[in-house]
Amino acid sequence: MTARAPLMSLVWTDHVTGRQGFLVVDRLVRGVASGGLRMRPGCTLEEVTGLARGMTMKEALHYDPEARYVPLGGAKGGIDCDPRAPGAYELLVRYLRAMRPYIESFWSTGEDLGLTQDLIDRAAAEAGLVSSIQAVYPLLDDEATARKRLADAFAVEVDGIGLDELAGGCGVAESVLAALDRAGVPYPGTRVAVQGLGTMGGATARFLARAGLTVVAVADIKGTIANPAGLDVEALLAARDGYGTVDRHALRPGDRELPGDAWLSADAEVLVPAAVSYAIGTADQHRIRARWIVEAANMPVLPKAEELLAGRGVTVLPDVVVNSATNAWWWWTLFGDIGADAEEAFAHIRRTMRALVALMLDRADADGTTPRAAAHALVTERLPAIAARFGWYR
C-alpha cells in the first residue's frame, strides 16, 4: 500500500504542561474514521500517522459487503506522556476537551497503549462527551438497541476477565494457530515468548496456553520472566496490576527474572510483541531464534529489520491483520453481526481471523512476497470497492 498524505493531521499543545497530543485522520468512510487513543512517553506525530494508516487497512481487510458492519475510515490519537505520571489523567481530560468537536463529528476512538477503556470513558464524560464512539451513532439503524448490546458485551466476563479485554487476544492467538496449522506444526511443544502482559499480550498468552502451547517467557516494564518448562500464565495474569506489570511474589521457584529485552532471544518458535511500537530494529533482529513473529502490537517490527528477518527465514505476521479483531469486535457487536455473548464472539473472531490469515498467506505464496506485502495488496484492491460504494468523504 503506497504511503500518501492523511486527510487531516493535527498537533495539540497542552496549555498547562506544554505536552503535545496528536490526531491523524487517514480516511473517512461514511463520514467517520475509527482508531484508538494511546498515551506513552515519546509518542510522535509520525507514529500516530502510521497507526492511522494501519487503521484504514484494518477496516478494509474486514470489509464484507453482506455484513451489517461495513468499514469506517482510519484514524488515531496519541499523547506524549507517561500514563503513570502525576497529572496524566488531567492531561487526558484536557486533550479530549480539545478534541471534542472531532469526536462528536467524525472520530470514533477507544483504548490503546497506556489507556484503558474505563479510563477513557471516565475522562470523556468529564470532557462533556456522550461517548468516545458517538460519531458512529448516526450510522446505526437502532441506536438505543445497538448501544445496549455493546454495553452488555462490555459487562461480560470470562474467568474474571472482560470480554472486551479478550477479543483482541483471541484474534492474535488464532493467527498463531492458523500459521502453525498451515505449517503442520503441533501445538504441544511449540514455545511462545510474549512482550507485554497488558490487555492484548495477556489475552494472547491465555488463549495460546489453553490451546496447548508453552509460554516460556513474558516481558513487562520490570523485565522478562522466563521458564523453559513453561510459565503459569493464569497465575501471572492474576498477579498483574492495571498496567500489565506482574507482582514478582507470584513467581514459582523455576521462574527466572531476566533483563527486559531477553524475550527477544528466547528459545521459542513464536515471538509475540504485544507492547510498544518499534520494538524490533536492525540491532535486535539477529538475536531472534523464532520462526514466526506475530505482531500483536502496532508497528513493532521496523521495515529494515523485517527485511533482514525474512532473509533468515523468519516470517512476520503483520499487525494490520493479526491485531485487527479488537476493532472489528466493537463494530460487529455494535452493528449487530454478533450479540453480547462470549462464545458467539470468540467463534466469529476465530472464523474470521482464520479466513483472513489464510487469504493473506495464500496471496503471499502466489505473489512470492511477504505476508505484509500480501496484506497491503488486499487493501489496495478493497479500498476502491469501498470508495465506489460510499465515496471518499461521505
Image: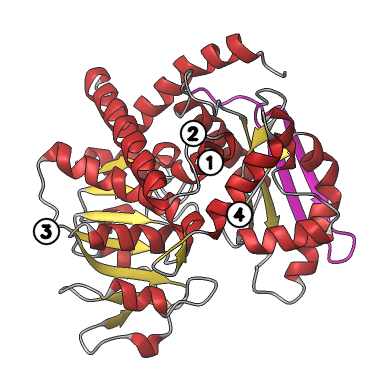
- In the rendered image, residue 5 lying in the magenta stretch gets the answer yes
- Which residues are the magenta region? 1-27
- The local crowd at label 1, few if under 14, some if 14 to 19, many if 20 or more residues have their Cα within 10 Å, is many
Marks 3 and 2, how far apart in space?
A: 34 Å
Between disc 2 and disc 4, the foreground one is 2
Q: What residue type is labelled 3?
A: Pro
2 and 1 marks in contact (CB < 8 Å): yes
Residue identifier under label 3 = 188
Q: Which of marks 3 and 1 is nearer the N terminus?
A: 3
- The local crowd at label 2, few if under 14, some if 14 to 19, many if 20 or more residues have their Cα within 10 Å, is some
**Residue shown at 59%/62% (left/top)?**
114
The kind of secondary structure element at disc 2 is loop
2 and 4 marks in contact (CB < 8 Å): no
Q: What residue type is labelled 2?
A: Asp
Marks 3 and 1, how far apart in space?
A: 33 Å
Residue identifier under label 1 = 333
Marks 1 and 4, how far apart in space?
A: 16 Å
Marks 2 and 4, how far apart in space?
A: 22 Å
Q: Does the rendering let one see residue 87? A: yes
**Residue shown at 74%/41% (left/top)?**
134
